Image: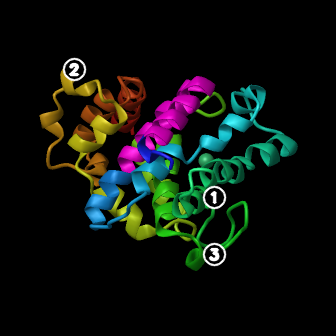
Amino acid sequence: MVDLKKAVESLHSAIYIKDFTTGEHSKRVSKLCHLIAKKLEYKSRILPIAGLLHDVGKIGISDEILNKFGRLSETEYHIIKRHSFLGSKVLEKIGNEELSKAVYRHHEKLDGSGYPLGVKADRIPFDSQIITVCDIFDAITSCRPYLERRDIVDVIEILTKEEKHKINQDIVESLVSIDLSDLILVIEPHCKKECNVDKLIGHNLNSLYHPKVREDFNHFYLGGYLVDNFNKDMEDYFKT
Ligand SMILES: [Fe+2]
């Protein structure tokens, strides 16, 4: 009989050993999944675990491809896309079919444009749909070797406009409604000590359209990374 908790911890350590960045990303996705499920009052036995292990199949992808600086070639992209299948195979061994299926379909899109199967909404488990939203959110707001970290406001635009027909908008709405004081602790757990998180209570991602809240959030959330850009934006604004 497999001890699920031990198996999950062991696999998550394996992800960390393979690639620290993916280990951290997985932890954040799992926490975001949990917050969204709470907002939606959605009860799932496997969601935070599936969030934590959604990229476990990346253990089977070479470091050269996983950490490549710059765009992937078509062949490399094809190889990296195998990670959802590989992950589901690993999780099949634990004997939890729901978990394996949620991971297998975490890159499927509602309109059928995802992978590996290209199935549409009705064949994508709700757990996978939540992971997809959290995965995109975290990927765009994190530092990656091949793309620049994006402003949090850009992320809302991507989720609600560019990805509108591809990802579940009820889930996006829940993400957007999470209190920034909770969200920041998922992304930057050290903020609890260093930042005045209380300042963010009562605000959500929509509040970031307000320049003052956006300035505070970018300062805390991105560790000052965007503050210079923000100030530059403001300078340009005052010039016009
Ligand atoms: Fe993935």
Q: Main secondary structure of the magenta part?
A: helix
Instruction: Say which amino acid is labelled 1.
Output: Tyr
Instruction: Say which amino acid is labelled 3.
Output: Lys
At 82% from the left edge and 40% from the top edge, which residue is drawn?
A: 76
User: Does 17 appear in magenta?
Assistant: yes
Question: Who is closer to the viewer here, 33 or 196?
Answer: 33
The numbered dot on residue 120 is 3
In the figure, 72 relative to 40: above or below? above
**Label 3 element class:** loop
Q: Looking at the picture, how far across and down is residue 215, in whole percent?
A: 28, 34
Question: Who is closer to the viewer here, 99 or 236?
Answer: 99
Q: Which residue corresponds to mark 2? A: 194
Instruction: Say which amino acid is labelled 2.
Output: Glu
Q: Which of the marked residues, 1 or 3, is nearer the chain's N terminus?
A: 1
Measured Cα–Cα span from mark 1 to mark 3: 14 Å
- Residue 120 in view of the camera: yes
Question: Who is closer to the viewer here, 193 or 1?
Answer: 1
At 67% from the left edge and 35% from the top edge, which residue is drawn?
A: 59
Q: Left of 73 or right of it: where is 98? A: left
- Residue interval drawn in magenta: 6-32
